[in-house]
Structure formats: structure tokens, C-alpha cells
């Protein structure tokens, strides 16, 4: 029994001649425990799909069953409660509340659940420890780095023990090292049983997923199971095949191309990993050298 | 379950101190004005009650003008404000005084006539008072002591002597005890032989400050300005308090007869005086408080305005909160809490400021405003209710925002 089941789900914006089809009769079943990477160019409907699955948006047509329960029948209050208890969001732009400190931000979903202050702060602190931010509890979000903010956001997404984590380009605003940390976190969550849905432009990140879904013009054009740690072949090609609309897409295309190059020499996965490691060490080195200068 | 709405609201308010201050200013101003007006009215009423105890409850006042309309039982049904304020004049004559003097059950009486005139002394002129023609009974019937010197005696009723109120001494003679000095009324020189103790305000009626009066013998004043003085009061005291009603009826019948059956005068018992001044005061206080209440309304609209701005400014925040599971009701409560908090804090400072204004009035003027606990409770409740009422529309607006649109609004 799939935890998420979409049947002929469409989303239209505008009306008359100005109607745009954001989702075009999408059918998608996701089993509990899957790690699904959703790929596709800008405007292909990835985010709209995430918003509908995450109960932030309603489909114009079609049926969406969450844990075999038709979502259309839920009242707004029940939808909010489902968002609160069953779904954790991780956004590209983090979306922490700037007026609250990290601890309060993480504890906020518990506020809406009606958990007592002491209990909810304790729980938030535990989660911050889990994402490695135990010493940043009382920082305001603007005093943290992007990677730290995203880790806090993940802690917030986890605070209500949701079955489903929806991450919409979680690494889109992060440098590669922070991306790595965030991806490892998501991967770890997946291992402990969470269903993870992740939108990404970066084909490299599909290596963490065990299923890749490709979208174009509001439709799912390809759906592929992959082994963890592998970048599916199509992920690399997709970026080149589909027309690009933004600079971001171009960049993603370039990175896809770069991934294709070392393929001739052997296994790409290991290669990229070592490349990553190199990058990491390079940055570390840089930090070291600047430190030396300061001294 | 405590959700931290109020502490969050406090944080928001503290973060934008000036904006919050200007938002609350309307409420503060409204509360200060309403509380002050009502307190002033209360203070004056309190003073009137004190006068009653000074004058004695059995004192009967005969006044010109149809001050009150009575029903069959003699109870006041309406106060006619045209006659009730100030001295009034014109409808009492010496014949009426004689009629009163011949009443039964009469212990004492004192007729008072008014010359609406100032006085001069040397180069100084005094134009902010009045001259009253009285007789020897006057101080005793209103229970007022002469602080310096003494009142004129029966033998002096035809001599040019005066006793003056404190204000006259200060303003005309620039000293506290100008006994032996003289002042001129209508070209006639009068010698000052006494200064009254400070009068409580409004003893003879609302709007009369007896401290700025010059008290001359009535007979002498009549001869100095025979066509200009007018009888304004006859104060009567019965032999026994139990006979007050009898006396009132007697006087009423006698004067009505003398006036050809027309009720162009009023015979008023002391407790009715309170009723009359209370009635005038209530009308006046109510009117001004009503006007002041408009600023309370404006204050509430200020809260609504700022909350509407706040809601649209924080659309993205609302989106985030909804995404992580806030229900419409929880979002609404959050903004309601904020508006209520604005009202509450505004109300608090309004009350604090009211006490300050009260204090300033007390030390700078003669008035003794009284802030009643009821008024404070009323003001607080009004402030909170205003926050709730005027916070509702913005809060509902916030709650109804579509989560995805709100989240996209990344201002």
C-alpha cells in the first residue's frame, strides 16, 4: 500500500486563454521508506507537485490519497494537522522565522501541536543535537551559516516525527560542503524509516535516492528505480535533453556534462566522490592558510 | 495550552517600539480623556456632597426661575438647565421675602441680592467677581466662618462696610488681610471689615465661586444701586428638620399666590440641590466623555490599521507557520493576541497617564478629580475589548491566507 498515491492529478493556474498547466494528469505512487529524487527543468511542475503532496496546495483535478485516505475530503484544520504531524518541510530558502531563535524555531511545530513549553524545548534541543547544532540553540537564524540554518530547518521538519520529509531543493542555496552534510542527514533519515521526497536540479544528488522521477511540462516523463550511491544514467542526460530556461538550468546542465566526462575512465560514482573529497580538502586547506595569515 | 502567542506578541511590539507607541497613542489618549473627564465630574460631585454636610440637610433655598419641573408628588422630573446654572435672576421680589419671613416653622432666613458689578480700590479694579447684598444671618445660615475680622452686625446694616472673599483680597488688594482698606462700588466707598474663610465651591449653585464675592449689607447695597440689585436667593432654615416639608409647601403656596399662580421660581431642599447639580454634571460629563470616547474609537481603528499592515508585511511568516502545521485558528489567535496586547499595553499606559494628569490637575487647580476603581476597570476592559474587536478583521485576514501563496510572498 503506497503512502502517497496520486491519480490523474492536475493543477491549473489562471483561466481562459491564460490557463497554465502546472501539473498534467500526474500518476505517482510512493511507498513508505522510499527516497525519491524529483528532477526536471524549471517550470516542469516539481515544486507544484511537492506542494500538493505536502498539502500546501490543492490539485485542480485528480485524486490524492495520503496513507490511503482521500485528501480532498479533509477540512482546512485537518489538512493543517496532517501537515503538522505527518509531513516535514525542508525548503530551498530555509524559511526559519527570523524573529525567533533556533531553538524556538525548531520547537514551533510542537507549539501548534499543543506541547508544553518545557517538553517542547527539550525535544527541540534533542533534535538540534542530532543535526549537530547543540551549541547554536540560542542563536538567531541570521547569525548562522546557510548550512547550519538548513540543518536547523531539518531539525524543525523532524520535530513532530513525520513519516514524510519533503525537501524542495534543500541544497539549492548551499555550498558543496554544506550540501553534503545536509544530504547525509536526509539520507540518514531515510535509513531510519522516513519517506523522503527531494526536488533537485543537481543530478549528482540523485545518488542518495533509490528512485528518480523526471518531470517535464507538468508530466512525469520517466520514473526509475536506482541503486543507492549510483547516479542513474538518465539523470545526467535529462539535463541536456530538456530545453533549459534559466541560468540555473544551464549550470545544472554544465555540471551534468562534467559528470559525463570522467565516465570514460571508469566508475563515475567513486570518481565524483573523490572529487568531492578533494574539494573538501581544498577548502579546508584554504581555511587553514587564511588562519595562518591571521596569525 | 499556552502557545507563546502573548510573549511573541510582546516581542513583536518591543521590536517596533515607535510604531507600537503611535498605534497605542489613540488608545492612551482616549483613555486619559475619558478617565479624566469622568474623574473631574466625580470630584465635583464629591465636593457638592461635602457642601451639603456644611450647609446642613434641612436648608431650603428659594431661587428665581423655574429651575425644576416636578410631578404630582413633588419629585423632580426634569431640571431646566437655563435656570439651573449660575445665580439666575429677575423673578423674586421684596414682597416674596416678606412672605417667607412670615411663614410658620421658620427658624432663620437670609435673603441675598446680586449686583453684577466689580469694584475698584485706588488704581486697581476688580472685575471678575460680583457683589452680594446679604444680612447678618448669612454666615451662620451657610455655616461659613469669617477668617479675619468679623461680619457686620445688625446695627451696621445701613453702613458702607463689606466682607470679602479670599480671591478678592488677593486680586484687588494683593494681600491676605486688607482689613480697614476701602473699595468703591458704584462710586460709594465701602470699608473692608472682614475676609471669609475659603468657600467650598458652588455653595449657592453650580458655577458660582463665592471666594470672588464681595458681601455688603443688602439694605445699603439697595440704596447704592437701587434699580440694579436683584434678589437671587432666599435661604431658609426650619425650626426642626422634620418641618422642612411643611415649610417648603408653605413658601411655595405663598409665592405662587403672589406671582399670580405662575411657577417662575423654585423652592428647593438641600438634597435636591445635589440632584440638580448632579443632573447638570452628569449631562455635561456624559457629553464630554462621549466626545472623548470618539478618540477611543479612533485608537481602535489605529490598532486595526497597523494590524492590517502587519498581516500583509508578515505574509511570508504566515506561510511558514502554516507549512509547519499551524491551523487557521492558531494563526488567527496569534494576531488576535498581538492586537489584544496592543490594547492592553495602551490601556495600561492610558491609566498610568490618567493618574499623572489627575495629579497635575490637583496641584495646579482647585479641582479635586477622583479616579474611581470602576472607571479604571472600565478603561482596561474597553482597551482590551478594543484590541479584540479591531484585531478580529486583520486576524481573520491572516488566517484565511492560502498557505502556498503566503509562502511564495517572499518580501
Image (tube, coloured by chain):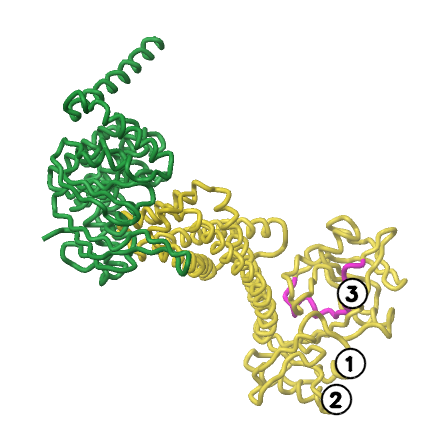
Which quadrant of the figure has residue A250? top left
Which quadrant of the figure has residue A177? top left
User: Is residue A120 among the parts visible in the rendering?
Assistant: no
Which chain hosts label 3? B
Number of residues whose C-alpha sits closer than 10 Å to that of mark 1, classed few (under 14), some (14–19) or many (20 or more): some
B16 over B266 or under it: above or below: above
Q: Same chain for the residues at labels 1 and 3, yes or no?
A: yes
Q: Report the side of A268 relative to A99 (left or right).
A: left
User: Is residue B276 among the parts visible in the rendering?
Assistant: yes
- The label number, if any, that marks residue B131 in the structure image: 3
- The label number, if any, that marks residue B93 in the structure image: 1
| Label 1 or label 2, whichever comes before in sequence order | 1
For the magenta stretch, what is the residue range? Answer: B127-144
The answer to whether marks 1 and 2 mark residues whose Cβ atoms lie closer than 8 Å is yes
Mark pair 1, 2: CA separation = 10 Å
Secondary-structure class at tag 3: strand
| Label 2 or label 3, whichever comes before in sequence order | 3
The answer to whether marks 1 and 3 mark residues whose Cβ atoms lie closer than 8 Å is no
Residue B87 is covered by the magenta coloring: no
- The label number, if any, that marks residue B258 in the structure image: 2
Give the chain ID for the green colour. A
Which quadrant of the figure has residue A237? top left
Amino acid at each position: 500500500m503506497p503512502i502517497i498515491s496520486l491519480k490523474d492529478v492536475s493543477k491549473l493556474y489562471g483561466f481562459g486563454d491564460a490557463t497554465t498547466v502546472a501539473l498534467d494528469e500526474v500518476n505517482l505512487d510512493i511507498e513508505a521508506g522510499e527516497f525519491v529524487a524529483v528532477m526536471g527543468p524549471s517550470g516542469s511542475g516539481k515544486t507544484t507537485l511537492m506542494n500538493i503532496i505536502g498539502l500546501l496546495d490543492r490539485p485542480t483535478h485528480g485524486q490524492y490519497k495520503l496513507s490511503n485516505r482521500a485528501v480532498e475530503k479533509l477540512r482546512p484544520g485537518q489538512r493543517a494537522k496532517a501537515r503538522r504531524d505527518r509531513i516535514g518541510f525542508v525548503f530551498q530558502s530555509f524559511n526559519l522565522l527570523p524573529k525567533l531563535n533556533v531553538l524556538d524555531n525548531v520547537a514551533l511545530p510542537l507549539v501548534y501541536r499543543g506541547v508544553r513549553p518545557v517538553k517542547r524545548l527539550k525535544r527541540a534541543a534533542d533534535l538540534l543535537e542530532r543535526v549537530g547544532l547543540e551549541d547554536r540553540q540560542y542563536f538567531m537564524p541570521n547569525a548562522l551559516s546557510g548550512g547550519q540554518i538548513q540543518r536547523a530547518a531539518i531539525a524543525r521538519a523532524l520535530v513532530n516525527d513525520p513519516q514524510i520529509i519533503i525537501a524542495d531543493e534543500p541544497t539549492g542555496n548551499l555550498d558543496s560542503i554544506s550540501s553534503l552534510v545536509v544530504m547525509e542527514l536526509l539520507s540518514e533519515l531515510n535509513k531510519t524509516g522516513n519517506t523522503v521526497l527531494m526536488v533537485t536540479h543537481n543530478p549528482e544528488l540523485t545518488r542518495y535516492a533509490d528512485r528518480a522521477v523526471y518531470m517535464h511540462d507538468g508530466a512525469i516523463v520517466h520514473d526509475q528505480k536506482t541503486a543507492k550511491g549510483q547516479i542513474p544514467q538518465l539523470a545526467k542526460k535529462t539535463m541536456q535533453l530538456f530545453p533549459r530556461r534559466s541560468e540555473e538550468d544551464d549550470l545544472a546542465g554544465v555540471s551534468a556534462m562534467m559528470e559525463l566526462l570522467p565516465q570514460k575512465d571508469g566508475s563515475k560514482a567513486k570518481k565524483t566522490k573523490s572529487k568531492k573529497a578533494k574539494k573538501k580538502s581544498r577548502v579546508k586547506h584554504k581555511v587553514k592558510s587564511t588562519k595562518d595569515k591571521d596569525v | 495550552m499556552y502557545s507563546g502567542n502573548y510573549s511573541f506578541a510582546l516581542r513583536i511590539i518591543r521590536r517596533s517600539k515607535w510604531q507600537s507607541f503611535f498605534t497605542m497613542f489613540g488608545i492612551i489618549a482616549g483613555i486619559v480623556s475619558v478617565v479624566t473627564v469622568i474623574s473631574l465630574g466625580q470630584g465635583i460631585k464629591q465636593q457638592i456632597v461635602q457642601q451639603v454636610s456644611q450647609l446642613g440637610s434641612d436648608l431650603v433655598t428659594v431661587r428665581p426661575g423655574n429651575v425644576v419641573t416636578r410631578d404630582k408628588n413633588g419629585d423632580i422630573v426634569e431640571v431646566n438647565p437655563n435656570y439651573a446654572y449660575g445665580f439666575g435672576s429677575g423673578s423674586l421680589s421684596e414682597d416674596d421675602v416678606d412672605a417667607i419671613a412670615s411663614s410658620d416653622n421658620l427658624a432663620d432666613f437670609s435673603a441675598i441680592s446680586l449686583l453684577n458689578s466689580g469694584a475698584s480700590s485706588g488704581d486697581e479694579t476688580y472685575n471678575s467677581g460680583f457683589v452680594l447684598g446679604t444680612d447678618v444671618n448669612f454666615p451662620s445660615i451657610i455655616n461659613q466662618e469669617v477668617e479675619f475680622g468679623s461680619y457686620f452686625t445688625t446695627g451696621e446694616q445701613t453702613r458702607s462696610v463689606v466682607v470679602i472673599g479670599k480671591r478678592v483680597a488677593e486680586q484687588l488688594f494683593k494681600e491676605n488681610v486688607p482689613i480697614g482698606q476701602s473699595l468703591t462700588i458704584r462710586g460709594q466707598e465701602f470699608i473692608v471689615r472682614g475676609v471669609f474663610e475659603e468657600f467650598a465651591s458652588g455653595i449657592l449653585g453650580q458655577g458660582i465661586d463665592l471666594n470672588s464675592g464681595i458681601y455688603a449689607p443688602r439694605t445699603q447695597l439697595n440704596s447704592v444701586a437701587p434699580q440694579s440689585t436683584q434678589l437671587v436667593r432666599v435661604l431658609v432654615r426650619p425650626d426642626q428638620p422634620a418641618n422642612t416639608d411643611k415649610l417648603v409647601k408653605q413658601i411655595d403656596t405663598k409665592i405662587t399666590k403672589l406671582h399670580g399662580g405662575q411657577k417662575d421660581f423654585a423652592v428647593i431642599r438641600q438634597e435636591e440641590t445635589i440632584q440638580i447639580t448632579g443632573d447638570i454634571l452628569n449631562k455635561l460629563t456624559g457629553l464630554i466623555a462621549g466626545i472623548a470616547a470618539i478618540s477611543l474609537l479612533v485608537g481602535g481603528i489605529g490598532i486595526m490599521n497597523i494590524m492590517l499592515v502587519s498581516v500583509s508585511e508578515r505574509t511570508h511568516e504566515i506561510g511558514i507557520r502554516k507549512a509547519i502545521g499551524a491551523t487557521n485558528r492558531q494563526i488567527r489567535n496569534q494576531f488576535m493576541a498581538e492586537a489584544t496586547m496592543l490594547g492592553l499595553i495602551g490601556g495600561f499606559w492610558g491609566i498610568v497617564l490618567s493618574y499623572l494628569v489627575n495629579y497635575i490637575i490637583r496641584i495646579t487647580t482647585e479641582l479635586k478629580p477622583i479616579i474611581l476603581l470602576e472607571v479604571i476597570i472600565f478603561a482596561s476592559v474597553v482597551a482590551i475589548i478594543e484590541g479584540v474587536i479591531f484585531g478580529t478583521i486583520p486576524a481573520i485576514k491572516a488566517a484565511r491566507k492560502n498557505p502556498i501563496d503566503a509562502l511564495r510572498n517572499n518580501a
